[in-house]
């Protein structure tokens, strides 16, 4: 267990908080989903009420240094949204390091909040530790950047679960440089570790995992890890067609990964009846709203592609979810953004919500799965919606995170 914001007195102290405010924006720079901002509010409010001088930092997207990046990837819309949600002015910094930042932070009064500009406007944020250890010049750049951030604060708080699996400067190097100062987690990470930790270590049974998405390769590690811990793995999405094709089923133009056929056969052999695959599919010749969709029980014709699980599979999977006491769902069952290929995913969302109503612990992870739950209007009926996509998967695999290990342990 790690120390949390509950364990420290922050009055009058400068508190540097790493958040994951990497939210989607449309072409007009309007936030289309502010879940990650809202999830950060409890930690921010606790620190404001504690009288800290709050310095927030985050990344947004993957800026590549182009001339429009300062506009397209600026955190200014997030500062505006935070100001509205907190009913308090959040001052927007012009950068995250440099000569103007320290005076801005030092001008804060107790309870004030500022947001640093996008960390990824500086390449040093994402220099991997492995590269830094073998290239002194890269190491010097990364540490110089991290020292500027570390110098801004008396306390470090990590509440960015979605990036905890990364060795970014703000996630790992900054708290390393702040050794001797309080380094704790926020409420969001505390909640993520509680739900995901229980799912891995001590799940109520039956423990059922629902996995979808495009590629087996993206979830190979978590499939292997969870097969030794769960009672059932229900596979949907395009990744199912790699398993089916490996067994000789004709999958038409469906997305699959032939180079993983051997691995798929190995996993099926190991799992036996614990790994379920679709028994029917919804297929079409193109991905298009309102496209003519056909249901196929087994083989898919050569000119069609599987784009959703079929009604028999929906019934089978719903039955397994109805019996579950713990459910982890990561990845949609089809191309749910494009009707009519959303029916399987929406049916699974309903089945997971109904399981929650019956007392099951339900955990939804991954941006697409969370978006599907939102689209179904069922987010309030899920035990926990994780803000971490890749981080959630790696945690479920049983991997440890250096960015968490470096923080202060609770007594």
Image (cartoon, helix red, strand yellow):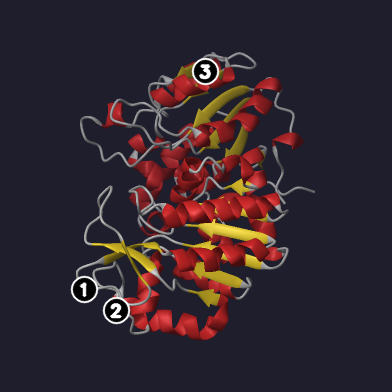
The percent position of residue 198, horizontal first and vertical second, equals 70, 58
Q: Counting residues from the N terminus, which is met first, the one under dot 3 or under dot 1?
A: 3
Element marked by disc 2: loop
Residue drawn at x 37%, y 67% is 281
Residue drawn at x 44%, y 65% is 236
- Front-lying residue, 56 or 206: 206
Q: Can you say whether 181 is above or below 289 in the image? A: above
Element marked by disc 3: helix
The percent position of residue 209, horizontal first and vertical second, equals 57, 64
Q: Counting residues from the N terminus, which is met first, the one under dot 2 or under dot 3?
A: 3
In the rendering, which numbered label is found on residue 250? Answer: 2
Element marked by disc 1: loop
Q: Can you say whether 183 is above or below 399 in the image? A: above
* Circle count: 3
Instruction: Say if mark 3 contacts mark 1, CB within 8 Å.
Output: no
Instruction: Say if mark 1 contacts mark 2, CB within 8 Å.
Output: yes
Q: Can you say whether 25 is above or below 334 in the image? A: above
10 Å crowding of disc 1: few (<14), some (14-19), many (20+):
few
The quarter of the picture where residue 242 lies is bottom left
Q: Can you say whether 246 is above or below 68 in the image? A: below
Q: Counting residues from the N terminus, which is met first, the one under dot 1 or under dot 2?
A: 2
Residue drawn at x 65%, y 22% is 48
The percent position of residue 315, horizontal first and vertical second, equals 53, 65
- Is label 3 or label 1 in front? 1
Instruction: Say if mark 2 contacts mark 3, CB within 8 Å.
Output: no
The percent position of residue 339, horizontal first and vertical second, equals 34, 49
- Front-lying residue, 193 or 157: 193
In the rendering, which numbered label is found on residue 84? Answer: 3
In the rendering, which numbered label is found on residue 302? Answer: 1
Do we see residue 366 in this rendering?
yes
């Amino acid at each position: 267990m790690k120390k949390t914001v509950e364990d420290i007195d922050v009055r009058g102290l400068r508190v540097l908080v790493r958040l994951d405010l990497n939210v989607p924006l449309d072409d007009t720079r309007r936030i289309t989903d502010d879940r990650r901002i809202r999830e950060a509010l409890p930690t921010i409010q606790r620190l404001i009420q504690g009288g800290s001088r709050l310095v927030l930092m985050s990344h947004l997207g993957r800026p590549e240094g182009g001339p429009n990046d300062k506009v397209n990837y600026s955190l200014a819309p997030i500062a505006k949204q935070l100001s509205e949600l907190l009913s308090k002015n959040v001052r927007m910094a012009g950068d995250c390091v440099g000569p103007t930042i320290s005076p801005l932070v030092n001008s804060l009064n107790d309870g004030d909040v500022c947001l640093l500009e996008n960390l990824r406007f500086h390449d040093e944020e994402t220099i991997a530790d492995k590269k830094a250890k073998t290239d002194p010049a890269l190491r010097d750049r990364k540490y110089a950047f991290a020292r500027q951030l570390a110098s801004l604060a008396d306390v470090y708080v990590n509440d960015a679960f979605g990036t905890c699996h990364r060795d970014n400067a703000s996630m790992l190097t900054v708290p390393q440089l702040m050794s001797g100062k309080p380094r704790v987690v926020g409420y969001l990470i505390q909640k993520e570790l509680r739900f995901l930790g229980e799912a891995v270590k001590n799940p109520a049974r039956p423990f059922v995992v629902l996995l979808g998405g495009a590629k087996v390769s993206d979830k190979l590690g978590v499939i292997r890890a969870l097969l030794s811990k769960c009672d059932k793995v229900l596979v949907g999405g395009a990744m199912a067609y790699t398993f089916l094709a490996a067994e000789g089923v004709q999958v038409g133009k469906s997305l699959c990964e032939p180079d993983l056929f051997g691995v798929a056969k190995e996993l099926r052999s190991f799992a036996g009846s614990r790994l379920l695959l679709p028994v029917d599919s919804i297929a079409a010749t193109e991905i298009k709203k309102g496209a003519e969709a056909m249901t196929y029980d087994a083989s898919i014709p050569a000119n069609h592609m599987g784009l959703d699980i079929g009604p028999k599979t929906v019934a089978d999977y719903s039955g397994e979810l109805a019996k579950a006491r713990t459910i982890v769902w990561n990845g949609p069952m089809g191309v749910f953004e494009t009707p009519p290929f959303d029916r399987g995913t929406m049916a699974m969302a309903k089945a997971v919500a109904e399981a929650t109503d019956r007392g099951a612990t339900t955990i939804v992870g991954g941006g697409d799965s969370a978006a599907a739950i939102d689209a179904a209007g069922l987010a309030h009926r899920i035990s926990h919606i994780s803000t971490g996509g890749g981080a959630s998967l790696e945690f479920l695999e049983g991997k440890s995170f250096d960015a968490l290990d470096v923080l202060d342990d609770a007594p």
